[in-house]
Amino acid sequence: MADKFGSIYQDPTSVNEITGSTPYGTYDNDNSFVSESINICKFVSRRLGHPVMQLEMNSGSIYAMYEEAVSEYSTQINQFNIKQWMWDHYGTSTKISGSQYSSVSESMTTGSVVPTTPSMGTTFMLSEQYGQAVNVGGNATMYSASITLTESKQVYDLNSEASYESTIGGNDRIEVQRVFNQGPSAMSKFYDPYAGSFDQQQMLDAMGMGNVSPAVSFILRPISYDIARANAVETSDLVRKSAYSFELINNKLRIFPLPKDADEGEKIWIQYYKRSDLRRITNSTLSNKVSDPSNVPYKHITYEEINAPGRQWIKKYTVALSKELLGIIRSKYANMPLPNGEVSLDGEALKAEGREEKTQLLEELQTFLESVSLSEHARKEQEVADANQAVLNKAPLKIYIG
């Protein structure tokens, strides 16, 4: 068993002792951390009874506890920020990896990130997919294809008779979004410059236009008048004629009306998505982006960036860690021999006190962080608004005499 008197605490005399004395050296380049090290050692040692009592650990152990306290404070703050802003970073910020943790790596060393601008986060990603479903957005490419009409042929097989902009390979399928098989607009019949001249006269009379065709007379009418007449023409075409339409069943496209001689060689165009594009769950734009809380790019906060309340918490937490460590050491040397007997050390009591203080400090910090969260801020704003409204409700109303 090693002699405990070989590691007796003495106050450090130079800040240079801190460099290389901490386990990870995370804050060795942080001037504020280094310059504060001597004062931290003196503060912790005095809280533990030095110089009245001997401390069975050297300043290097306190440096290690000091580094852990700063890192724990940084962790608590970063976890709070991750909870607040996780979905603003998701899929947008470049992620970090623990495998890059080294003293020379810039990705996992120290430094706070700039304040995150609130955004809709993943709501935009979700709305993009809603837009894709109705053909106004999304991240899947919409392609075009066409079929060539044949006289008197009404059904066409999209697998064998369509020409595609992008080749469909393997077992991939397509999802047809639009089929451009549409008749001329009803309004073109109204605004034909020759409307009312020959064969259209009967239609104009039937539709209430008579001798006031918009193309040949200048009578100002409400726009609803034209819309109503256009709807009437389209309904007439649908009921009385072979209206332009289609059916798509099992990749068989049936078009209406039946193609005539004049339609031979004409094309009907379709727009489609590839099923593989719609079902793709990864995207090149999301490569190496934040995917979960483990790789949100928050680094260790430097001691220089921590304000006075944070530094005070770190001091107390360093004392609690050092007290627990000293308790562990003294528990190993439970009894100290004396000339006429022995004396028992307070190792177990120190361990218990240190752990209790650690738990209390962590709970206090977490409670404080929760009190400044976005949800808590919104709740307080609501309380203030309700209180102001209650005051205004008690204000007397003026009486007006007319």
Image (cartoon, rainbow, N blue to C red):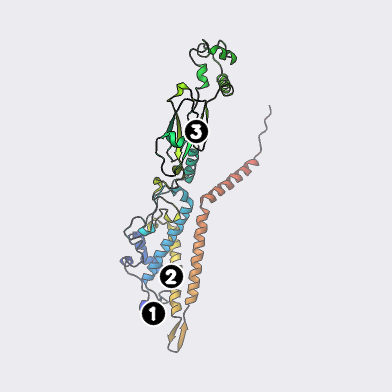
Which label sits in the foreground, 2 or 3? 3
Identified at 51% across, 38% down, the residue is 250
Q: Which comes before the other along the chain, label 3 or label 1?
A: 1
Kind of element beneath mark 3? strand
Residue 330 appears at what percent x and percent y?
44, 77
Residue underneath mark 3 = 253
| Residue with the most extreme bottom position | 340
In the image, residue 166 sits, relative to residue 268, either above or below, namely below
Residue 339 appears at what percent x and percent y?
42, 89
Q: Which comes before the other along the chain, label 2 or label 1?
A: 1
Kind of element beneath mark 1? helix
Q: Amino acid at mark 2?
A: Ser
Q: Amino acid at mark 1?
A: Lys
**Badge 1 local density, few (<14 within 10 Å), some, or many (20+)?**
some
Residue underneath mark 1 = 4
**Badge 2 local density, few (<14 within 10 Å), some, or many (20+)?**
many
Identified at 45% across, 65% down, the residue is 317
Per the model, the C-alpha gap separating discs 2 and 3 is 79 Å
In the image, residue 20 sits, relative to residue 108, either above or below, namely below
Residue 303 appears at what percent x and percent y?
39, 59
Q: Which comes before the other along the chain, label 2 or label 3?
A: 3
Can you see residue 364? yes
**Badge 3 local density, few (<14 within 10 Å), some, or many (20+)?**
some
